[in-house]
Image (cartoon, grey):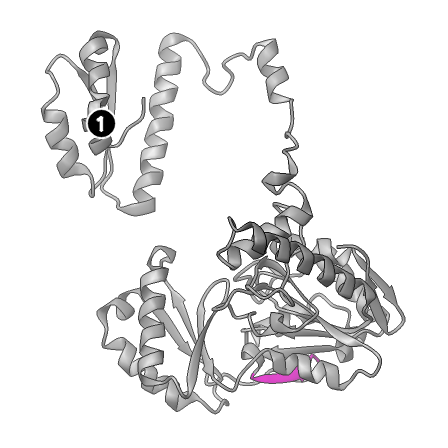
Amino acid sequence: MLADYRNFAHGRHNWIHKRGEQTVVIAFLTPESEPLARRTLALLPASVRVLRLTTQSEGAAGTLELLLQVFRVTEAIGKKVGIDPGRPGVPGYGRRIYHLGPVVLPSQHADTAIEASVARKLAARNSSIRSEDRESVMAARANYVTALRQQRFGAFVADFDGTVVHPGASSTTKLLPTVAALLEKLLRARIPVYFATGRGNSIHGVLTGTLGKKYHPLVFVSYYNGSVTLPLTETPPSDTGGPHHEVFEALLRELKSDPVFARRVHPVNKSYQLTLKIKDQADFPLAAARIRETVLASFAEQLRVVESSHSLDVISRATSKLECVRLAQSQLVDAVPFTIGDRGALLGNDYDLLTHPYSLSVDAVSASLTSCWNLLPPGVRNVAGLVHVGKSLVVRRGYFTMKAP
């Protein structure tokens, strides 16, 4: 039986009263729970056997320490009774149960890509239980898929972190072979590839270190959430050369007066954008709320906040990843750009990018029925989602079309 200390107070102690002689209480004590734990254990009958597992570490570190202690206790008990906990012996029916494999659920449980994509849109619209909106979303999805199949695309515009690479990948990261193969397939067909990213020069090393040099003239990077777009053949913009350094410094001065911000956030003024990394993801909601409130209260006419997969970015109100899309479109005649990203919800840094009428998300979606659809099967997301979408592309010389996603 497993219970926290207050849940234990709601009748769980009855087990000890009825079966005390056959029971051992294993108590976990952390700095947060120790006062209540000691008061609770002190009230147990003296005859009850109690094993205390303690840690002086807080949070996740304490959890890991206690987990290691559980392993040691399990090992000791196993030796005592002559059973290896890692190889306890599995009966034939147990093996058959193990190898049953996944169960295909009815379609109403969103087991198909169609149902999953509809469920995501309904959730984004906060209308999952309204049958009339479900019918509208189903119809909108069908229309959207038809539009994708009928369109000719002349440029591929992608977010980077959370879409092309895993969130927070370092500048020495190589693109996954499947991702590199997809991009080079497009580039071989003379289809330009644009990256609309919140990064600065760290993306440059990843791309030049993976994509063949002969393709670099067809690759463009829209740095700092659309602030500056340059071909991969050119040097990335300097972190100190942007136009917004002073206003970001003014914002930082105001934020640093708040002890919540000072303890929880690591800011980097890149002059094109202010990147704010929250040290502990558990503090993200509090820190993000404080940052957004400050921007809205004192800098609303100049700045806005967007959320990436690993940080908050403060950017100029005039900055948008759609600038990258507009540049791509300006180079096309009989085709349009295709856009893909992962943070398509309202506050996400791909929201603008995925308002484009031919856009797919590999994770979060907006409430719009005319853009930002996630058509992936359940359980497929981020980089795996990009690869999945890539399999639906029919690449021709200078353009590509889409089969059924």
At a point 44% along the width and 89% down the height, the residue shown is 244
- Residue 42 makes an appearance in the image: yes
x then y, percent, for residue 236 = 60, 82
Q: Is residue 46 above or below residue 339?
A: above
Quarter of image, res 94: top right
Left or right of 318 on screen, residue 268? left
Quarter of image, res 186: bottom right
Determine whether the residue tagged by mark 1 lies in a helix, strand or loop: helix
x then y, percent, for residue 305 = 43, 75
Q: How many marks?
A: 1
Q: Which residue is mark 1?
A: 8
Q: Is residue 204 magenta?
A: no
At a point 77% along the width and 78% down the height, the residue shown is 218
Q: Is residue 283 above or below residue 190?
A: above
Point out the image quarter for the C terminus.
Answer: bottom right
x then y, percent, for residue 134 = 59, 52
At a point 77% along the width and 69% down the height, the residue shown is 212
Q: Nearer the viewer, residue 1 or 50?
A: 1
- Residue 177 makes an appearance in the image: no
> Dot 1 surroundings within 10 Å: few (below 14), some, or many (20 or more)?
some
Q: Nearer the viewer, residue 265 or 129?
A: 129
Q: Nearer the viewer, residue 185 or 291?
A: 291
Inspect the image, locate mark 1, and give the three-letter code of the amino acid beneath it.
Answer: Phe
Q: Is residue 232 magenta?
A: yes
Task: Please provide the residue range marked out in magenta.
Answer: 227-233
The residue at the far right in this view is 397
Left or right of 183 on screen, residue 169? left
Left or right of 202 on screen, residue 183? right
Quarter of image, res 262: bottom left
Point out the image quarter for the N terminus.
Answer: top left
At a point 33% along the width and 45% down the height, the residue shown is 61
x then y, percent, for residue 70 = 34, 28
